[in-house]
Image (cartoon, rainbow, N blue to C red):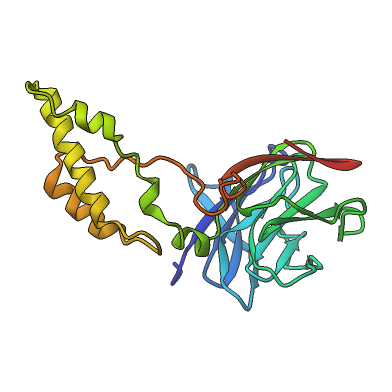
Amino acid sequence: QFEHVFGLFWGPLCCSDSPALLAVQHKKHVTVWQLQLSALEQNKLLCTQTCEMSEPFPLLSQGCVWHPKLDILAVLTKRDTSVLFSVRVDNRRVKADIKGSGLIHCACWTKDGTRLVVAIGSALHSYIWNDIQKSLVACSFCPIFDVGGYICAIEATGEAQVAVATELPLEKLCGLNAGIAFDLPTETEALHSHGSHLSDDDSLLESRRRSFESERSYIPSSGPLDLTHLLARHRRSDPSPLIHLRRRDTVTGSGQDSSHLILVTYERKVTTT
């Protein structure tokens, strides 16, 4: 039993006869457990703690990242990245030498297990793992690669490739002029809907059009928008559970502030898709 458990992460299946490994993520520390069936009692599971590691900062929500092929665990906080390389025995580890002052958000191993890629702000920090020397060193040809957007998730997609998802930083999202992003009917559509005869479907559309027009008069012309008030007003005037929004880049108009999914390949040089 523990006071706090924030996540469970199964280790890789290195060989069929070795006990399974389970990393348990707590608030500021990680415990690793070895699980195997008892040879003496049928259907009894033996659970033994093999190592424990504490950190000065809280672990990230996905703060435990197992190596794809070895019993090696990367542990992430917003400031540090550590690699535990002997989790079945003790808590020996090496730390990544992180350049800069940004906050770590997520990380992953490439599928070949030779590279640990750490996302810090809009940049990918790449480290090469040497299993013989038990060392973690910055990539020689591209230690830091900026993808041009705040990285919110990362996942290995190939032997030397990762996929990253980028999004607007929260401070930009809160400053958007959300009102002009509403998909409102044009004046022509509005006039057309005022015909002399309206079917039941037309009446419903007209009701929703008036709902949108009502919201339009409520939306401020600039600054942040409180969507809770918008939702309450919408529900009073429209039975539909949906508020229709359309995507629009209201920050620069260039498309550079949209979310992106980017494939980054590390092969002698870095290429992106």
Residue 236 % position (x, y): 12, 49
Q: Is residue 112 above or below residue 80?
A: above
Give the number of callouts.
0
Give the camera-side residue of 157 and 234: 234
Q: Is residue 50 above or below residue 157?
A: below
Could you tell me which residue is drawn at 78 percent across and 45 percent down? Answer: 113
Give the camera-side residue of 11 and 101: 101
Residue 254 % position (x, y): 60, 46
Residue 39 % position (x, y): 59, 45
Q: Specify whether 247 is left or right of 141.
A: left
Give the camera-side residue of 1 and 114: 114
Could you tell me which residue is drawn at 38 percent across and 49 percent down? Answer: 180
Could you tell me which residue is drawn at 75 percent across and 43 percent down? Answer: 110
Residue 69 % position (x, y): 75, 43
Q: Specify whether 222 is left or right of 198.
A: right
Looking at the rendered image, the quarter that the N terminus falls into is: bottom left
| Residue 37 in view of the camera | no
Q: Specify whether 242 is left or right of 23.
A: left
Question: Would you identify the image quadrant in which residue 57 lies?
Answer: bottom right
Question: Would you identify the image quadrant in which residue 123 lies?
Answer: bottom right
| Residue 109 in view of the camera | yes
Question: Would you identify the image quadrant in which residue 241 lies?
Answer: top left
Looking at the rendered image, the quarter that the C terminus falls into is: top right
Q: Is residue 241 above or below residue 226?
A: above
